[in-house]
Image (cartoon, rainbow, N blue to C red):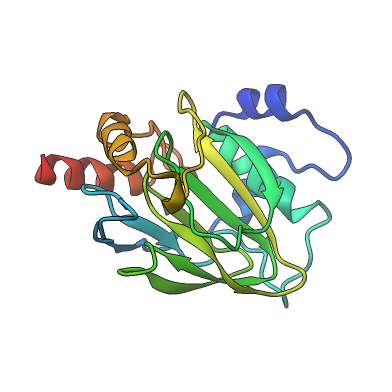
């Protein structure tokens, strides 16, 4: 992670952790990957799998609560690894995807049952505090159920363009074209230069081209 970059972009305000503090919360986790098929409505991604890290950031209930805002921990972490444009919210309850960008989601608080991959070929994924899921461009997603205290932090690789496409937008062909042109991110949003995501996606992209 790049310390000076994070300090410059986010500042060191009260309640905001330093990169060193966030690094102390990181735990090595083996990525879980799964592929989602194009169903003719939701494109998903033809050559990149979804990557899920189970509690790579130690924010789960029962641990000593950090003195800083847990959402700020994800913001610092993602930004230091060149995933920016961060936001705090939940997850929309309607099906949508992003054709112009990949997306990382960190669960800062609460729990979420998310429908990932479209209504026909998708699957329900349970996410809890500290989990991180990376959705390649085109991956359909929406909220199925969530706790009242849910707080999600999202971010995007530098250089990408945020968009939001719904099935009723009838932009399926355009989405596919944008997805194929999108470059791979430079760094893993959680583990940076030494993270597995970029290698996983490079191998997958090479195998499917």
User: In the rendering, at what x and y percent does residue 191 appear?
Assistant: 46, 46
User: In the rendering, at what x and y percent does residue 188 appear?
Assistant: 42, 42
Q: Is residue 22 above or below residue 19?
A: below
Q: Is residue 188 above or below residue 69?
A: above
> In the displayed structure, does residue 99 sit left or right of residue 95?
left
What residue sits 78% from the left and 59% below the top? 66
> In the displayed structure, does residue 51 sit left or right of residue 69?
left
User: In the rendering, at what x and y percent does residue 152 appear?
Assistant: 65, 56
Image label count: 0
What residue sits 48% from the left and 52% below the top? 96
User: In the rendering, at what x and y percent does residue 15 appear?
Assistant: 85, 45
What residue sits 32% from the left and 32% below the top? 178
Image quarter in which the C terminus is found: top left
Q: Quadrant of residue 76?
A: top right
> In the displayed structure, does residue 110 sit left or right of residue 112?
right
* Closer to us: 42 or 206: 42
* Closer to us: 89 or 205: 89
What residue sits 13% from the left and 40% below the top? 206
* Closer to us: 95 or 70: 95
Q: Is residue 208 above or below residue 83?
A: below
Q: Is residue 79 above or below residue 42?
A: above
């Amino acid at each position: 992670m790049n310390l000076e970059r994070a300090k410059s972009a986010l500042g060191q305000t009260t309640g905001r952790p330093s990169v060193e503090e966030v690094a102390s919360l990181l735990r090595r986790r083996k990525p879980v990957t799964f592929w989602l098929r194009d169903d003719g409505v939701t494109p998903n991604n033809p050559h990149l799998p979804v990557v899920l890290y189970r509690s790579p950031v130690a924010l789960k209930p029962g641990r000593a609560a950090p003195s800083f805002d847990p959402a700020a921990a994800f913001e610092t972490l993602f930004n230091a690894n060149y995933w920016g444009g961060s936001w705090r919210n939940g997850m929309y309850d309607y099906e949508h995807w992003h054709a112009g960008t990949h997306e990382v989601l960190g669960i800062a608080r609460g729990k979420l049952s998310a429908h990932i991959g479209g209504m026909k070929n998708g699957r329900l994924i349970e996410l809890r505090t500290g989990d991180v899921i990376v959705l390649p461009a085109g991956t359909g997603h929406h909220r199925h159920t969530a706790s009242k205290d849910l707080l999600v932090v999202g971010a995007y690789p530098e250089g990408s363009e945020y968009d939001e496409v719904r099935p009723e937008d009838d932009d399926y062909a355009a989405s596919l074209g944008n997805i194929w042109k999108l470059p791979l991110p430079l760094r893993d949003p959680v583990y940076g230069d030494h993270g597995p995501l970029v290698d996983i996606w490079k191998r997958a992209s090479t195998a499917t081209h």
